[in-house]
Amino acid sequence: MATVINMPRLSDTMEEGTVASWLKQVGDKVAEGDILAEIETDKATMEFESFYEGTLLHVGIAEGETAPVDQLLCVIGNEGEDISALLAGGASAAAEVVEEAPKAEEAVAQTAEVPAGVEIITMPRLSDTMEEGTVASWLKQIGDKVAEGDILAEIETDKATMEFESFYEGTLLHVGVQEGETAPVESLLAIIGPAGTDVSDLKGGVPAKAAVADAPVAKKEEASEVAAPAVVANTAASGRIFASPLAKKIASDKGIDLSSVTGTGENGRITKKDVENFKAAPKEAVSAPAEAKSSAPAPQLYTPVGEQIFEETKNSQMRKAIAKSLGKSKFTAPHYYLSIEVDMDNAIASRKQINALPDTKVSFNDMVVKASAMALRKHPQINTQWQDDVTRYAKHISIGVAVAVEDGLVVPVLPFTDQMTLTQIGGNVRSLAGKAKNKKLTPGEMSGSTFTVSNLGMFGITSFTSIINQPNSAILSVGAIVQKPVVKNGEIVVGNTMTLNLACDHRTVDGAAGASFLQTLKTYLENPVTMLA
């Protein structure tokens, strides 16, 4: 049977959404948990996943189009299923298809009539993956007056604790979920209406959405009672401005300084209406208080005004591949990081002597690669690969060297690095880097690494951490050589140091193994003559 999926409410203030992109096309198979589309809300662009499986039979909102919440988004069902009658039937047919059996709250709705002016508030879906929410705290108590834009409660979702504001005004008549309690999305959260209204028939469940939508809005006379209290300052002694999240967003979009807006909400809180109705006072009409005129002049506030502009560029295949591989590594391999400082005085002197030879050019990065290869030979645990059932120990050593190119990052590999001399490593790295920048690297030249070195020292970066280049178990991040005061033989002298950070996969490399590897690596770099043997 076909399932109708409507535009979801992905944020507490969302009234409409824009389909940024469809990740499934009509005719594609859809599994539960698959991402159907990216939907742009008033707060962010979020992935919307399917709670059903089948075939995508129909798309109701094309890419780039905007539609209100609960409008037909798409239809999922059996391949080849005829849904023409469903599409022609509109919202009523959609509701009939989505729900195979009436829920408990709908059964209540059939017997309970919503009194005039009463609004049923259900647990909102405040994130795309939220299935239930916990009331962290109620900011309103039963009997309190509620104005549109007031914060009713703080609700903890699966992603964050968010303020939930009221879209209605009246009196808080009933609370369905107590502080600290958890309830599924769309279960009864609260009831708002005219003071003294009997809502005992509604406390046992939530009326159907249609009943709620059709309930008339509270009379203007009642609304005026809520707004009647005198307006107070909206800025606390600490300088914090109290405003609803939606009011802040609208003010930001319009370039309005919230400190200039008078709040009509509770305790001077700025609401959506306050921002929408705000008109900046003419400069000549603004005058300082009498007592201020005799003292220093009031500072002139500057409110930046401009248009928020974005430029979109299509992601290249390389960028997508980088995102996919590094995302997989970061979220599947439990990374941890070790750091060590290396005295580079001897390395600087040795490199100067080596490069004095004819036709010889060795970089500090070449020395790090050579030292890493020799250290890996002594610490085979670092030269491993994690698989579900076994850990693979590589008997050979092939180091990948990260190279930045225009579209991203590539990692050419030096096969059997431990067999190369410093000059051979330098020549091969320069050759591969040149091919990388000209997009001439072959897949074979970028595969087969057992360890990776990433160096940002040439950019002046003194310390950083990298994401492991799987299936490697570790990656070495190399910082810049820094001249600074150091202690040698009990005296403070000027020295040259370099910071190395090792990211390890804790599934294969324990902390002690990683630390021992770094100690050996440090020994080689501080005594370069040992790498010439």
Image: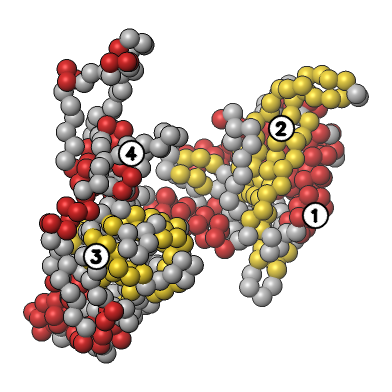
Badge 3, how many Cα within 10 Å: few under 14, some, many 20+?
A: some
Q: What amino acid is at disc 4?
A: Asn
Name the mark on residue 195.
3
- Residue bearing mark 1: 512
Please determine whether, in this image, residue 88 is positioned above or below residue 37.
Answer: below
Residue at 70 percent of width and 40 percent of height:
500
Q: Secondary structure at mark 4?
A: loop
Inter-mark Cα distance, 2 to 3:
71 Å
- Residue bearing mark 2: 498
For residue 371, side relative to residue 21 (left or right): right
- Residue bearing mark 4: 234
Q: Secondary structure at mark 3?
A: loop
Residue 165 x %, y %: 31, 56
Q: Secondary structure at mark 1?
A: helix
Q: Secondary structure at mark 2?
A: strand
Residue at 33 percent of width and 39 percent of height:
234
Residue 477 x %, y %: 64, 42
